[in-house]
Amino acid sequence: MEITNIFLFIGGLGGTEVILILVVILLLFGAKRIPELAKGLGRGIREFKDATKEVKSEIESSVKDDERK
């Protein structure tokens, strides 16, 4: 339910607001630093997805083991 609320908030942003946010980020971090931040964010998201897949597969394998018994 909370995810839906977050997406509703993002949907309310117009073009001007998005540009303003990007300019503020550029001013705060600088042009050289932004690719490094994006790369780190991508790595974090990838690790999170891998961890969730691992947990899901462990749960599914334990359910299959219980069904066999």
Image (cartoon, helix red, strand yellow):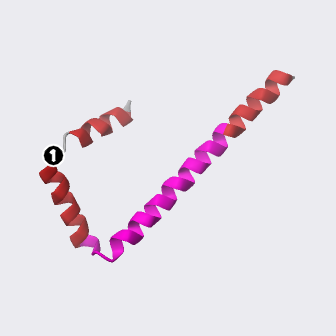
Q: Main secondary structure of the magenta part?
A: helix
In this rendering, is residue 65 above or below 14? above
* Residue situated in front as seen by the camera: 17 or 2: 17
Q: Quadrant of the C terminus?
A: top right
Highlighted magenta segment, given as a residue range: 28-56
**Quadrant of the image occupied by residue 35:** bottom left
Where is mark 1, residue-wise?
14
Camera-side residue: 2 or 56?
A: 56
Asked whether, in this view, residue 48 is left or right of residue 12, the answer is right
Residue 49, percent from left and from top: 55, 48
Q: Residues within 10 Å of mark 1 (few under 14, many from 20)?
A: few
- Give the residue displayed 31% in from the left and 38% down from the top: 7
Identify the secondary structure beneath mark 1.
Answer: loop
Looking at the image, residue 43 lies above or below residue 29: above
Q: Which quarter of the picture shows residue 30?
A: bottom left
Is 61 on the left or on the right of 39, as rendered?
A: right
Q: Quadrant of the N terminus?
A: top left
Assess whether residue 41 is covered by the magenta stretch. Answer: yes
The picture places residue 32, in percent across and down from the top left corner, at: 33, 77
Where in the figure is residue 13, as x and y percent of width and height? 19, 45
Locate residue 3, reporting x and y percent: 37, 36
Outermost residue on the right side: it is: 69
